Amino acid sequence: MKWEKKGLLSNCTTIDLDWYKKNTMCPLPYKINENTIRLFLAFCDENNYGRLGYLDLDIENPANILAYSQTPILDVGELGSFDEHGILPASLIKENNDLYMFYTAYQKQISVPYSILSGLALSKDNGETFFRTSNAPILDRINGELHQRSAAEIMKKDGVYKIWYTANIGWIDNGIHTVPKYDIKFLQSDNLFKWDGTPIQSLALKDDEYGLTTPQVFFENGIYKMYYSVRSISKGYRLGYAESEDGITFERMDEKMEIDVSEYGFDSEMICFGKIFKHGSRTYLFYCGNHYGVGGVGYAELVK
């Protein structure tokens, strides 16, 4: 896969909102109508607490921003809740006329920096607004995954719901501060609201990596194809790619992704949280830049 970078779409300096002052995180593209991609994002305030917003983009030319959310379409949770310190979009699934969003949620802790669990929100108006289906996590703590169950990617296939998500396997010092160590796990269920199965590792860390996250999975030509973010001590964040026959255990083929940081600009230090959007013969890749999105969100287009 060869990608042509198209540049920066937006950051907190290009959009003037009182609730958007820092990072732009976790783009999640959705076809809102025949002419428009709605790019759901976390717009972060001065404390870096994310709230759900969006950019509406021209489907033929995503660099053309048609509109953006003036107020949060999903705000942080109530005091003491698992999502009180920020939320990030993760994945979408449409059931009849209802649009469900799995979202990633932060809550600060004392002995470790934070917990990161998953919530589920519902839109009855095709992505104009969302509300929580519960004030409790859809993926809560379990033995072996006490601090992080996040970035859930949802797919329904053969009547069964499948998710791939980020799960913590410890904490490390990356030379700057204490950070979680995490890989990607798999679960399936016949109930969108209940995930009680035993997690299976889908994707493992290697070398000096300490994070695999934001999986996105397609089923094409009998193969499951996963795009994801890779975090390492030597490089920070980059993007990876893997394939699987069963959708459970994936073989990493990161070299096929063929996109890296730029020489200068908003993505000169890292690229992360990438999500694919396909439109006819065209394939777009939306991703975040330096320092987990402080640089902003940009996009690239597949050329080969």
Image (cartoon, rainbow, N blue to C red):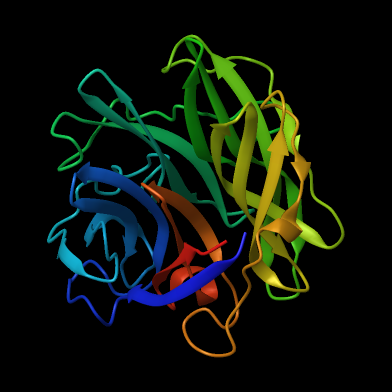
Residue 54 drawn at (x, y percent): 24, 56
Q: Nearer the viewer, residue 237 or 31?
A: 31
Residue closer to the observer: 85 or 59 = 59
Front residue of 276/91: it is 276
- Residue 63 in the figure: left or right of residue 91: left
In x, y percent, where is residue 155? 48, 27
Q: Is residue 292 above or below residue 104?
A: below
Image check: 134 left or right of 74? right
The quarter of the picture where the N terminus appears is bottom right
Residue at image position (21%, 38%) is 130
Q: Is residue 280 left or right of residue 180?
A: left
Q: Residue furthest bottom?
A: 264
User: Farthest residue in the right direction?
Assistant: 207
Query: Quarter-wise, where is residue 71 in the image?
Result: bottom left
Q: Can you give x and y, in whole percent of width and height, for residue 17 in the image? A: 17, 71
Query: Is residue 147 shown above or below 244?
Result: below
Residue visible at 74% across and 36% down?
Answer: 250
Pick the front one: 136 or 186: 186
Q: Is residue 216 left or right of residue 76?
A: right
Q: Quadrant of residue 99?
A: top left
Above or below residue 275? Residue 292 is below
Q: Where's the C terminus, which quadrant?
A: bottom right
Viewer can see residue 191: yes
Exactly how many numbered labels are in the figure? 0
Q: Residue at x 24, y 80 (%)?
A: 14
Q: Is residue 147 visible?
A: no
For image coordinates 30% across by 76% down, the residue present is: 12
Q: Position of residue 28 (x, y in %)?
A: 38, 50
